[in-house]
Image: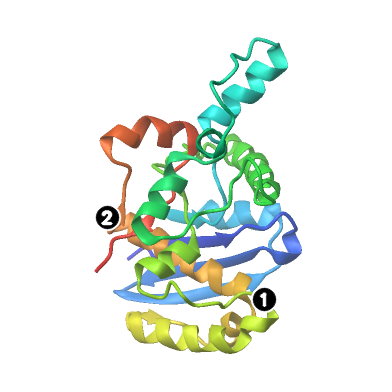
Amino acid sequence: MVPLLVAGIDLAADPRRTGLAVLREEDHVVRLDDVHVGASDDDVLAAFLPAAKAGVDVPFGWPRRFVDLVAGHQAGDLESPAHTGPDWRRAVLFRETDLEVRRRVGKTPLSVAADKIAYPAIRWAAIAARLREQDIPTPLDGSGVACEVYPGAALAAWGFGAQRYKKASGALVRGELVDALSARWPWLDWAGHEDVCAASDDALDAVIAAVVAREVLLGRAIAPRAELAAAAADEGWIWLPTPE
């Protein structure tokens, strides 16, 4: 039986803070084959090549209205809006998938148009171009090998939304979270990588990204509704695991 590989990437702008995890499923056993922090563009590409699915924690695209605003401003033919209040700014700066995640799990993703999350998103755009050169399509809606994920929102969908596990201050909580996820995922053999994930939120997010990608592959994640399909194709889509 050929093993099934699923990858998870916690993509940072800096490769030194980029986490990468690989799940290997063989003979009905799912094993965390590798997890480490410090993944270069070449490492990410190498993880994609054999993968059946890969979850990437980064925005795949920008809001359509933001793209139109920048293009119109550059061309000098931008139509003036009726107002520039909070509702208008929200419509320009957030994608439909961002608003959908907020509606479903109460977490608002960072704006790729107005926050530092744009830095890794630009890196992803370059990596996606390299993937296409390898004949790996990268549709923004996640219908190809790559799908956009958001570990914090996935945790909220699983009932762990209040966990503050990031950075050094979250080390204790992170260790408890690894234990809780181990109990929730009895099918996953962590293969001794629990300590790495407890020590680094980048490593843990990469594992969560891989697990969500596996859920997408198995049809246990939330696809865009018909009325959001066009926006997902243009802007990207954050895949959330189906609530149990």
Left or right: 242 in relation to 21:
left
Report x, y in % for residue 176: 49, 89
Name the residue type under label 2.
Answer: Gly
Q: Residue sitting at 40 percent across and 68 percent down?
A: 156
- Above or below, 239 relative to 225: below
Which of the image's four quarters has the N terminus? bottom left
Image label count: 2
Q: Residue sitting at 54 percent across and 69 percent down?
A: 205
SS class of the residue under badge 2? Answer: loop
SS class of the residue under badge 1? Answer: loop
Q: Residue sitting at 65 percent across and 51 percent down?
A: 117
Badge 1 crowding class, 10 Å Cα cut-off, few under 14, some 14 to 19, many 20 or more, is: few
Badge 2 crowding class, 10 Å Cα cut-off, few under 14, some 14 to 19, many 20 or more, is: few
Left or right: 47 in relation to 228:
right
Most distant residue in the top direction: 77
- Above or below, 80 relative to 66: above
Report x, y in % for residue 21: 54, 68
Mark nearest the camera among 2 and 1 is 1
Which of the image's four quarters has the C terminus? bottom left
Could you tell me if the residues under marks 2 and 1 are in contact, i.e. CB atoms within 8 Å?
no
Q: CA distance from mark 2 to mark 1?
A: 32 Å
Report x, y in % for residue 192: 53, 88
Closer to the camera in the image, 204 or 169: 169
Report x, y in % for residue 118: 67, 46
Report the residue marked by disc 1. 167
Report the residue marked by disc 2. 219
Closer to the camera in the image, 136 or 117: 117
Closer to the camera in the image, 2 or 20: 20
